[in-house]
Amino acid sequence: MDPLYLVRLAGIEPTTPWFVAKYSIQLSYSREKQNYSSKFSPLGSPRPRFFAEREIRPAYGWLAAIMKEYSASSAYLPRMSDSAALDLSDAYRLREEERTRIARDLHDELGAQLTGIGMALGQLREQLALEHHAALPQADYAGQLLQQAREGMERIIDELHPPIVEFGLVDALHWQCRHFSRQSGLDCRFHAEQGPTVHDEFLVLGLLRILREALNNVARHAAARTVQVRLEQSGKHLHLSIADDGGGFDPALAGRDGRRGHGLTNMRQRAAALGGSATWEARASGGTCVNIVIPVTL
């Protein structure tokens, strides 16, 4: 099958995220083939069977070339069409739901098993201590490894589905700023005017992930000393701004030098998935300000 035909058939735009584009190609391929071959998944199945990958892989190459050419020649961060934004929102919602399920399973299943191992190891250590056994240092070392495993699991769970989102938007963003200050040593201050009460978990997750990405960029690239994060509600829109006093950068060049392009694209796509927009501007006093505008239902 012609790979370029598949790309066109899937209705992919240059601004479509890569994982959404691949899904669209797979679904289009499956629908085309199911009419005359029983070897492929039925109509509407999420993806064709594995051996079909060999035939549709050339379409991925075409898609990558089209996206690369588009990003190099177009204005930075073009506005996404309404249909593409809707598809993106659905894709992000599905991904967040799957992340939530995995985080819950890790906490319930693996967490319980690690707790059981810790209890058994504690009893073993007590017995070894009573006997002054030579294996006591090994038991202590196993306890340290177990603690590291617990901390690793908690980090993974926090990445998949941060528990703080259950407390609402203001508390989640405030906690993230405090956490960033402890980790980086930078002065990160959070201000929430009029205390917007938002508890839509998808919205809270999206803005929290945008803030994390923005703060990560500040720590890695900005050489800043302070960060000001402000959240306010104006009418039917939420405004989130992240301003630093670092060296600043040119957004038009970020996608070409490979240093920040992916991070900025991720923020734009997350904002678009929430029905909003993300923009970057240079501050008159130095540094960069990220502006996120998201519509909310009152």
Image (cartoon, helix red, strand yellow):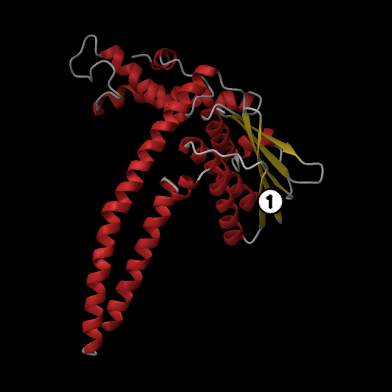
Type of the residue with mark 1 = Val
Q: Which residue is mark 1?
A: 227
Q: Residue at x 22, y 19 (%)?
A: 40
- The vertical placement of 198 against 163, above or below, is above
Residue found at the far left of this picture: 38
Quadrant into which the C terminus falls: top right
Q: Residue 247: image x %, image y %?
A: 74, 48
Q: Secondary structure at mark 1?
A: strand
Q: Is residue 128 left or right of residue 211?
A: left
Residue 224 visible (yes or no) = no
Q: Is residue 164 left or right of residue 73?
A: left
Q: Is residue 211 left or right of residue 60?
A: right
Is residue 202 or residue 91 the one in the foreground?
202
Specify few, some or many for label 1: CA neighbours under 10 Å numbering under 14, 14-19, or 20 or more. Answer: many
Q: Residue at x 53, y 30 (%)?
A: 274
- The vertical placement of 28 against 186, above or below, is above
Q: Residue 155: image x %, image y %?
A: 42, 55
Q: Residue at x 60, y 52 (%)?
A: 177
Residue found at the far top of this picture: 35
Q: Residue at x 34, y 68 (%)?
A: 145
